Image (tube, rainbow, N blue to C red):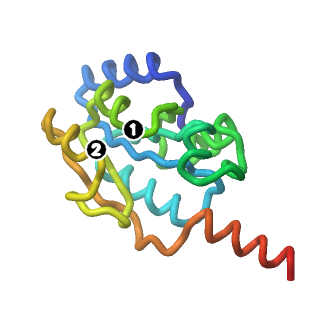
Amino acid sequence: MGEVLGRAELVERVRQDRAHGLTHALANGAFDLLHVGHIRYLDAARREADRLIVAVNNDESVRGLKGANRPVLPEADRAELVAALRAVDYVVIFPEPTVTPLIEALRPDVHCKGTDYTADTVPERDTVRAYGGRIAIVGDPKDHSTTDLLNHLRLKAEG
């Protein structure tokens, strides 16, 4: 089972891991309601390095990205659920609108994004490439989304 850590704790854990020769992949997202697309994304990201770090957007940033009715689950719950997945080693909640400051602090060997991106459209690509990191596009086709799941449930409830 993974651990939910604060940023300072995570930076130190990454430092210790690197001293032992371990590599790190970073994946990020809201993970509002876990679905099979999340599992496939994180399983694929885990194969990119020795350790998988998952950065979970805090509640305020999810509202900014997804709308006033989101997130469905609070950040602590979302982080705990993600940490319980077998692929995940470390989870951190981040408050910034992008994951760039966390990438700068951790300098993961690999920054993983889903298949709705290409290596050239990843917003953090320049930051990752500047320190010699690698971008990996992982997971299955983006056929699953929490928004679609919520819309489906809303239609069922109305119908």
Tell me if 68 is positioned left or right of 95 in this view: right
Q: Which amino acid does label 2 sit on?
A: Glu
Residue 77 in which image quadrant = top right
Q: Do the residues labelled 2 and 1 touch (CB within 8 Å)?
A: yes
Q: Residue at x 29, y 28 (%)?
A: 104
Quarter of the figure that contains the C terminus: bottom right
The dot on residue 124 is: 2
Q: Is residue 121 above or below residue 62?
A: below
Q: Left or right: 74 with respect to 109?
A: right
Q: In which quarter of the image is the N terminus?
A: top right
Circle 2: is it few (<14), some (14-19), or many (20+) Cα within 10 Å?
A: some
Which class describes the residues within 10 Å of circle 1: few (<14), some (14-19), or many (20+)? some
Q: For numbered disc 2, what is the local secondary structure?
A: loop
Relative side of 25 to 55, left or right: left
**Observer-nearest residue: 71 or 63?**
63
Residue 54 position in % (x across, y down): 46, 41
